[in-house]
Amino acid sequence: MSNPNHPATPEISGSTTRPRVLAISNQKGGVGKTTTTVNLATAMAAVNKRVLVIDMDPQGNASTSLGIDQKHRAVNIYHVLTGEASLDAAITPTSIPNLSIISSGVDLAAAEIELIDLENRQARLKEALINQGLGWDFILIDCPPSLGLLTLNALVAADAVMVPLQAEFLALEGISHLVKTIERVRKSFNPTLEIQGIVLTMVDKRNNLSEMVESDVREFFGAKVYTTTIPRNVRISEAPSHGKPVLIYDLQSKGSRAYLDLAGEVLKREQNLNHGVAA
């Protein structure tokens, strides 16, 4: 099954490079998962990293945020998970150099049910990546706000998890559930899965609660929490309605600068891992 509705994906020249796969996950909605995924991917692409975004959320917000029209989503991640299409056939280039996406589609909402009857249901994405996911430097998976089979597929396929955490009290309770889920996945399916880092989002430095939450998170998770925090910023909120990451919509905004700083931290951690240096 091919996708005739989008431009040809840039060739990867037969590269056998294994990508680093990061799942951006938190079962709580509205914490900035999609915003973090598309802007981190954009910042990485800007420094010549080849990046593939996989939109695993049935809402398809990552696809919309990267300007992918509905007509270019005819072949999407649903077809990859069900075996109806290859990974390569589902890739759509974006307008941003070095950045492509496997979009979400309306069918994906049914995938949670359909996957139950499929063989190796928790590892469908991992198998697709093993067979065809070579040549990218990073693959970023935007997970849905739940801990169902779609998120499980992402965690089984991932090398590490990035956790966006909104700077509010109830967010702390949600992250404890995610940590337990990661431990279960590590024990049963993916023994090398790790938390790459936790990024505090929607931080308002004028708000005492934000500062208290940040302090508690840093005390509990230590070096796993990125130094960079993502501020509440109207330009970040506006950008998706224009089909653009905030880095493209308004490069000079506080939100853009924060995501550039975050990308620098993420890439430095990855470099340290490659050289056996502790984060």
Image: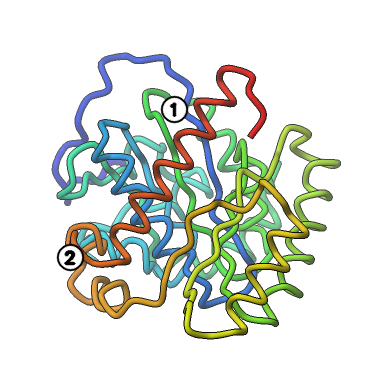
At a point 28% along the width and 60% down the height, the residue shown is 256
Rendered location of residue 250, percent (x, y): 17, 65
Rendered location of residue 137, percent (x, y): 40, 29
- Mark 2 lies on a secondary structure that is loop
At a point 36% along the width and 62% down the height, the residue shown is 62
Disc nearer the start of the sequence (1/2) = 1
Per the image, the residue denoted by label 1 is 132
Image quarter of residue 38: bottom left
Amino acid type for the residue under numbered disc 2: Asp
Question: Relative to 229, does residue 262 appear above or below in the rendering?
Answer: above
Amino acid type for the residue under numbered disc 1: Gln
At a point 77% along the width and 39% down the height, the residue shown is 189
Image quadrant occupied by the C terminus = top right
On screen, residue 153 versus residue 132, left or right, reads right
Q: Nearer the viewer, residue 110 or 231?
A: 231
Question: Relative to 180, does residue 201 appear above or below in the rendering?
Answer: below
The circle on residue 274 is none
At a point 25% along the width and 16% down the height, the residue shown is 13
Rendered location of residue 260, percent (x, y): 33, 50
- Mark 1 lies on a secondary structure that is helix
The circle on residue 250 is 2
Rendered location of residue 59, percent (x, y): 43, 72
Specify whether residue 257 is in view.
yes
Give the spatial CA distance, label 1 vs label 2: 35 Å
Q: Are marks 1 and 2 in contact (CB under 8 Å)?
A: no
Question: What colouring style does the render use?
Answer: rainbow
Image quarter of residue 241: bottom left
- Count the marks: 2
> In front: mark 1 or mark 2?
2
On screen, residue 10 versus residue 110, left or right, reads left
